[in-house]
Image (cartoon, grey):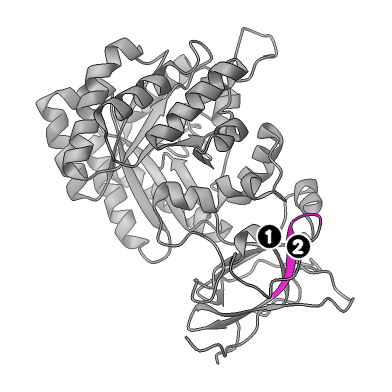
Amino acid sequence: MSRSGPPLPPLLLPRALLDPLWLACPRADGEGLVAVQLRVAEGRISALEPHEPQGGAPLPLALTPPVEPHAHLDKAFSWSEHPNQAGTVAGALAANGQEHLSRTRERVLERGERALGLAWASGLRAVRSHIDSLGPAAAVSWEALLELRQRWQGRIELQLVALVPIDHWQAPEGAALARRVADAAGLLGGVLGPGFVAPQAAEAGLLALLRLAEGLGCGVDLHVDEADVQPGVGVSLVSRLVRRHGFGVPLACSHSSSLGLLSAPALERLAEAMAAAGLGVVALPLTNLWLLGRRGEATPSRRPLAPIRQLQRAGVTVAVGGDNVQDPWYPGGAFDPIELLRQSLAAAQLAPWQRLGLAPFTTAAARLLGLAWDGVLRVGAPADLVVLSAGSWGELLARPPQRRVLRAGQWLAPEPTDSPFLAGLSPQPQGP
């Protein structure tokens, strides 16, 4: 690739998102940030150059586009019609069941289009969505989201997961569903753990699911241990079956919330078993902190949350997702990865200036979803960025930032801004 091309305005980028083999990379500052000038040709990075700040306007903080590893597009924005004001799992299940009865293809298309429009404008580049795949609206939900996947191809990569009770995979109907999902390049999923189905009762269904996935070449993404009791029993079962039978399918354990309630020695043993089994984890702080640990009118003192840092230390790939958006499971959210990052850093005490603190939103999430681009800027990588009206992590955490989104070297239409960080960004880089 030619190294010629127009330069972008100088930026501050995390060292963790820059080519580790870039020998001329300047030393990162105390926040892990590097002043960089990027050049673009034909929608890709053609050169990375050190930038020596000369005073004047502060440099804006930029990230490569984040990834949403766990969403529910089929039920998004349904809170107003199907609220769960008790904020409980039981209330969410009941409201979700009522919503499913009135769901139509048109509603799912409208919800999904709205969600992906917000995601695109906010800077997301990939979304994995679970779909309620059993019941009267299952077929229309799949039809609508497959249409949206095609409609958004080339902008947002949309991955789809079949969400059913775990024992459904034992039935002939489950095998038929798995074949349809595989033909649509989807993933198989299910729910297990306390509050949904006991691990002892789930073993046969989980084993059937894993055998179907192995035979069909599908990935698996489970809702597991979304609970505040019997910590880790579901993940323990998954780890044991995968290792015992030698399954090699990509497998994510979404939620894994109750693991945070284990004692340190028990968690260390389980995390090592998960790493040995090749399991990934998608932590979902906002929905889990909203739903779990409720005890009447008392403020909860024990908050079930996937123990991200302990799992990372054991070698488990961990991503962070937004999960539910304005539906019976969580009334907030807007498919905004920067707001998810801001809130999750505090909830999980992650440090974005450390590689492992930033990875769950960027590189680790890309790896867990099996994306072609790992989110690291190197020569030949997509010229895709999210540029923020902040010059440090502290400023990012202090207030919701404005942003400019770059896709294939072209700026998306900006919103009016008076930010000194974004004012110098040209509407569109000039061609080479």
**Image point 79% across, 57% down: which residue?**
392
Q: Position of residue 274 (x, y in %)?
A: 44, 30
Q: Which residues are magenta?
A: 30-36
Q: Is residue 290 magenta?
A: no
Q: Nearer the viewer, residue 358 or 127?
A: 358
**Image point 50% across, 74% down: which residue?**
408
**Image point 58% across, 71% down: which residue?**
413
CB atoms at circles 2 and 1 under 8 Å apart? yes
For disc 2, the marked residue is: 28
Res 104 → quadrant: top left
Left/right of residue 347 with respect to residue 78 in the rendered view: right
Q: Is residue 403 above or below residue 213?
A: below
**Residue type, label 1:** Pro
Q: Is residue 200 above or below residue 92?
A: above
**Residue type, label 2:** Ala
**Image point 69% across, 71% down: which residue?**
25
Q: Nearer the viewer, residue 35 or 242?
A: 242
Left/right of residue 193 with respect to residue 136 in the rendered view: right
- First in residue order: circle 2 vs circle 1: 1
Q: Quadrant of the C terminus?
A: bottom right
Left/right of residue 365 with respect to residue 132 in the rendered view: right
- Please say whether residue 65 is visible from this viewpoint: yes
Q: Is residue 34 magenta?
A: yes
- Please say whether residue 136 is visible from this viewpoint: no
For disc 1, the marked residue is: 14
Query: Which element carries disc 2, helix, strand or loop?
Result: loop
For disc 2, the neighbor class at 10 Å (few under 14, some 14 to 19, many from 20) is some
Q: Position of residue 124 (x, y in %)?
A: 52, 56
Q: Position of residue 228 (x, y in %)?
A: 53, 14
